[in-house]
Image: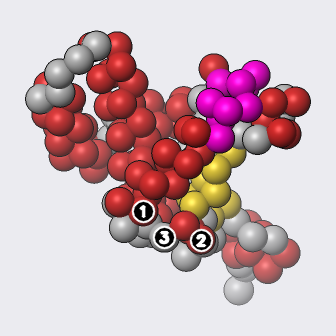
Amino acid sequence: MTRSKLAQLRELSVVVADTGDYDAIKRLRPVDCTTNPTLVRKALDLPVYAGLIERELQWGRAQAGDRNEVAKAVVDRLTIGVGAMLAELVPGRVSTEVDADQAHDTEATIAKARQFIAMYAAAGVPRDKVLIKIAATWAGVEA
């Protein structure tokens, strides 16, 4: 019997999905998965995330204040929402990237990482299932 390439790979390595495709992760069962802004944007086109999108847009519409800041908060909430859904599918970690716009600001990187961890915790995802990715800049190394 011929084993699939994926089965062969599983024997030699840990499989990590670099996608937000919920159905693919559910089907292929990687150990870990990763998200980044590009992957989240692409994933949000999938029907499985329609409820998440509507919930977060509704939250955003109910917020007062600077619309740009509210929009950024909605993006963060969508990012964590996608990650939280994926965390239910994988036994390992979901990695989430701090925006590259903060790559040269150590304090902003730390603050965003802590915010993401707190948001995951509020969504019921334990800290040991979350990996925060930061830019490989000097500020990122310091963070």
CA gap, disc 2 and disc 3: 6 Å
The span shown in magenta is 102-110
Q: Which mark is residue 128?
A: 2
- Which quadrant would the N terminus be assigned to in this image? bottom right
Q: Are marks 1 and 2 in contact (CB under 8 Å)?
A: no
Residue name at image x 75 percent, y 22 percent: 104
* Amino acid at the residue labelled 3: Pro
Is 67 left, or right, of 64 in this rendering? Answer: right
> Helix or strand or loop: what does disc 2 sit on?
helix
Residue name at image x 54 percent, y 30 percent: 38
Q: Which mark is residue 121?
A: 1
CA gap, disc 1 and disc 3: 6 Å
Q: Are marks 2 and 3 in contact (CB under 8 Å)?
A: yes
> Helix or strand or loop: what does disc 1 sit on?
helix
Q: Nearer the viewer, residue 21 or 118?
A: 118
Specify the farthest residue to the bottom: 1
The x, y position of residue 58, in whole percent, is 13, 33
Residue indicated by mark 3: 126
CA gap, disc 1 and disc 2: 10 Å
With respect to residue 12, does 51 lie above or below?
Answer: above
What is the magenta segment's predominant secondary structure? Answer: helix
